[in-house]
């Protein structure tokens, strides 16, 4: 009898998942407007949209195999120009709170971008603040001014939709006001159920396990018998073994065991910052940007090969109230969500991982966490060698986890359960 009850509970739970996260939900007009803006080539020259570097089929990150296999960084609308970082996923990031210093934990939390600099202080929403950046960034969409972006939108096929959403005459407001509304619209699309469907195998496991009466902590850390935690056998044995390892060594940062804001399933990030000792990516094209110049005559990267990405530390240095804490945060980057980390256009199409795209496979990433501090492994030194995290998890130091090959493979298998639409 018990056995037969579980599938029924699970069925109800899956039904609940569909209803709560709305697979079939239409976009609201505001979300639809954000989508138009996200996919429109608003750039100079007009060859690039947000989606050029954030492709849904690639887990909302860069889709070009050759780029991912090497430098990891995408060229701008002006093709000679490159920025310094790999595009992170734009999905599940709208849950990030406004950037702040958490006094209790002694950590910075929230914001958008790898270094949190789109804080959300302007529009109350980090994703909206973020969306104001790329249009005007000379190494991205390169539009000459806020006015030029607003004029483009006013002449677009979705200008009517804009006025429907924000009020008639809203496009006639000051360029600054209209520009903020553009940011809010894009953030609204990024927060939609189309971008954040919570439709991975892990989500089905999570919802069915909790519906069967298990404690979220146990569910998300794999603490208990598989038959009890996974009564419908949603995860394979290998994936479940991976969850157990993940729960011990990865979940402290990539949270797998707590609901996100609004009781959504886990987001696989705490939205905090850390330096896990990622090496430089020697193929990052930014190192050659001392030879490429902006309109004002300045090289894009005056430091050339000597450039070091200090991440959060360098952002804090720009803000008087936080500059005193900059040194303690050098080399820290925002903990990215791991949702869709394996999602790709086709089998074998490479993806690049970390802020500089230095790693090319999930196996490499896991092997790095496992053996970073084992000298015989010969990992290159960290890009920033201060503040590198060597914390103990379950009594084992990050960087020398002593996992065998089988355990590494299990973690990789588990990471593949985080792909939406399976
Ligand atoms: C040329 C490629 C490119 C284009 C075009 C681009 N982005 Fe990005 N995006 C990036 C890179 C690189 C980063 C990381 C930059 C950083 O952290 O300094 C990023 C970061 C982000 C983030 C932060 C995610 C997080 O979790 O912190 C969001 C959201 C985002 N982009 C949305 C957009 C939107 C919206 C547009 C269009 C208005 C856009 N991007 C256009 C490359 C691009
Ligand atoms: C102490 C916090 C912490 C722990 C523990 C941790 N990570 Fe991370 N993880 C991070 C940070 C920070 C980054 C980004 C670092 C960077 O880009 O320099 C990251 C990046 C990643 C990425 C790259 C994602 C992307 O989109 O580029 C993957 C994959 C990943 N971690 C998997 C894992 C796995 C698997 C484990 C457990 C073996 C783990 N992490 C443990 C903090 C952590």
Image (cartoon, rainbow, N blue to C red):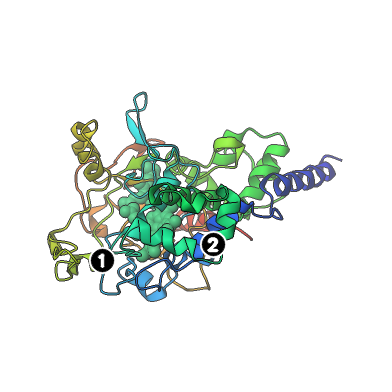
Q: Is 235 rendered above or below residue 95?
A: below
Between circles 1 and 2, the one closer to the viewer is 2
What residue lies at 32% left-to-right and 28% top-to-bottom?
106
Mark number, residue 134:
none
Residue most extreme to the right? 1
Quick one: SS at disc 1?
A: loop
| Residue ID for mark 1 | 284
In the rendering, at what x and y percent does residue 244 appear? Answer: 53, 44
Other residues around mark 2 within 10 Å, as few (<14) / some (14–19) / many (≥20): many
Front residue of this view, candidates 45 and 322: 45
Q: Residue at x 34, y 68 (%)?
A: 74
Residue 421 falls in image quadrant: bottom right
Percent x, y of residue 211: 72, 38
Badge 1 crowding class, 10 Å Cα cut-off, few under 14, some 14 to 19, many 20 or more, is many
User: Circle 2 sits on which residue?
Assistant: 36
Question: Is 122 displayed left or right of 389 in the figure?
Answer: right
> What residue is rendered at 20% in x and 49% in y?
384
Q: Do the residues bearing badges 1 and 2 touch, measured as CB atoms within 8 Å? A: no
Element at label 2: helix
Q: Which one is nearer the viewer's eye here, 252 or 133?
A: 133
In three-dimensional space, the C-alpha distance between marks 1 and 2, rounded to whole angstroms, equals 31 Å
Total numbered labels placed on residues in the image: 2
1 or 2: tag closer to the N-terminus? 2
- The quadrant of the rendering that contains the N terminus is top right
The image shows residue 134 at horizontal and vertical percentages of 36, 58
């Amino acid at each position: 009898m018990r056995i037969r009850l579980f599938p029924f509970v699970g069925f109800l739970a899956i039904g609940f998942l569909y209803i709560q996260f709305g697979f079939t939900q239409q976009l609201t007009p505001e979300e639809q407007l954000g989508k138009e803006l996200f996919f429109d080539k608003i750039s100079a020259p007009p060859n690039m949209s947000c989606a050029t570097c954030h492709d849904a089929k690639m887990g909302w990150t860069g889709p070009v195999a050759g780029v991912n296999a090497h430098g990891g960084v995408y060229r701008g609308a002006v093709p000679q120009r490159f920025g310094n970082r790999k595009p992170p996923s734009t999905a599940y990031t709208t849950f990030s709170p406004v950037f702040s210093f958490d006094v209790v934990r002694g950590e910075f939390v929230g914001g958008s971008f790898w270094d949190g600099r789109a804080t959300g202080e302007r529009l109350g929403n980090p994703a909206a603040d973020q969306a104001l950046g790329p249009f005007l960034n000379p190494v991205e969409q390169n539009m000459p001014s806020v006015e030029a972006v607003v004029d483009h939108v006013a002449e677009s096929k979705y200008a009517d939709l804009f006025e429907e959403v924000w009020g008639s005459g809203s496009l006639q407001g000051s360029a600054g006001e209209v520009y903020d509304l553009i940011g809010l619209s894009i953030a609204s699309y990024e927060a939609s159920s189309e971008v954040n469907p919570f439709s991975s195998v892990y989500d089905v496991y999570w919802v069915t396990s909790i519906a069967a009466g298990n404690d979220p902590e146990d569910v998300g850390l794999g603490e208990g018998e598989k038959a009890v935690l996974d009564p419908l056998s949603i995860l394979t044995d290998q994936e479940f073994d991976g969850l157990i390892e993940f729960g011990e060594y990865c979940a402290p940062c990539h949270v797998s065991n707590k609901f996100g804001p609004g009781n959504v399933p886990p987001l696989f990030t705490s939205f905090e910052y850390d330096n896990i000792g990622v090496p430089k990516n020697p193929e990052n094209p930014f190192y050659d940007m001392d030879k490429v110049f902006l309109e004002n005559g300045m090289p894009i990267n005056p430091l050339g090969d000597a450039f070091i990405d200090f991440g959060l530390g360098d952002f804090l240095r720009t803000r008087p109230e936080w500059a005193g804490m900059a040194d303690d945060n050098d080399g820290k980057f925002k903990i990215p969500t791991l949702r869709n980390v394996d999602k790709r256009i086709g089998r074998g199409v490479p993806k690049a991982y970390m802020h500089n795209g230095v790693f090319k496979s999930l196996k490499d990433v896991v092997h790095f966490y496992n053996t970073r501090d084992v000298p015989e492994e010969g990992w290159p030194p960290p890009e920033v060698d201060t503040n590198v995290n060597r914390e103990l998890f379950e009594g084992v130091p990050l960087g020398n986890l002593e996992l065998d090959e089988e355990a590494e493979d299990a973690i990789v298998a588990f990471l593949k359960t985080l792909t939406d639409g399976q």
